[in-house]
Image (spheres, rainbow, N blue to C red):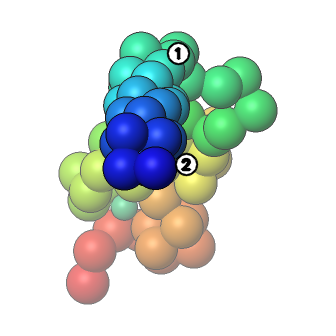
Amino acid sequence: MGRLLQLLLLVALALIVWRLVRKALAPPRDGEPPRFEPTGRCAVCGTHVPRGELDAAGHCPRCRGAKGPS
Ligand SMILES: [Zn+2]
């Protein structure tokens, strides 16, 4: 009976190790968003913001209305 328990524990341990190894080696999934968003530099104040927040002229949301940092 003791040997059966040992065998079961060994199989469970092997399964856990196998899953960990597979998870570590798996490539990142396509559905996940990128970990780092590309940033751009504001043409007025020089602040780095996500590219999506810059307008066509390269102004950050803070500088869009104003002439510059005040
Ligand atoms: Zn700015």
CA distance separating discs 1 and 2: 31 Å
Residue 55 versus residue 67 in the image, above or below: above
Going from the N terminus, do you reach mark 1 or mark 2 first?
1
> Going 58% across and 54% down the picture, which residue do you hit?
53
> Going 33% across and 68% down the picture, which residue do you hit?
68
Q: Position of residue 69 (x, y in %)?
A: 28, 74
Which of the two residues, 17 or 60, is positioned nearer the viewer here? 17
Residue 39 versus residue 30 in the image, above or below: below
Q: Position of residue 27 (x, y in %)?
A: 52, 15
Q: Is mark 2 within 8 Å of ligand 1?
A: no
Secondary-structure class at tag 1: loop
Question: Which dot marks residue 8?
Answer: none
Identify the amino acid type marked 2.
Leu
Q: Position of residue 13 (x, y in %)?
A: 38, 39
Q: Is residue 44 left or right of residue 27?
A: left
Q: Which residue position is annotated with label 1?
A: 27
Which residue of the protein is positioned furthest toward the front in this rendering? 1
Residue 16 versus residue 30 in the image, above or below: below
> Going 55% across and 48% down the picture, which residue do you hit?
54
Q: Is residue 58 visible?
A: no
Which of the two residues, 6 or 28, is positioned nearer the viewer here? 6
Which residue of the protein is positioned furthest toward the right in this rendering? 31
Residue 23 versus residue 25 in the image, above or below: below
Q: Position of residue 34 (x, y in %)?
A: 54, 35
Single out the mark in the foreground, 1 or 2.
1
Q: Which residue position is annotated with label 2?
A: 54
Identify the amino acid type marked 1.
Pro
Q: Which image quadrant: the C terminus? A: bottom left
Q: Is residue 45 left or right of residue 36?
A: left
> Going 76% across and 32% down the picture, which residue do you hit?
31
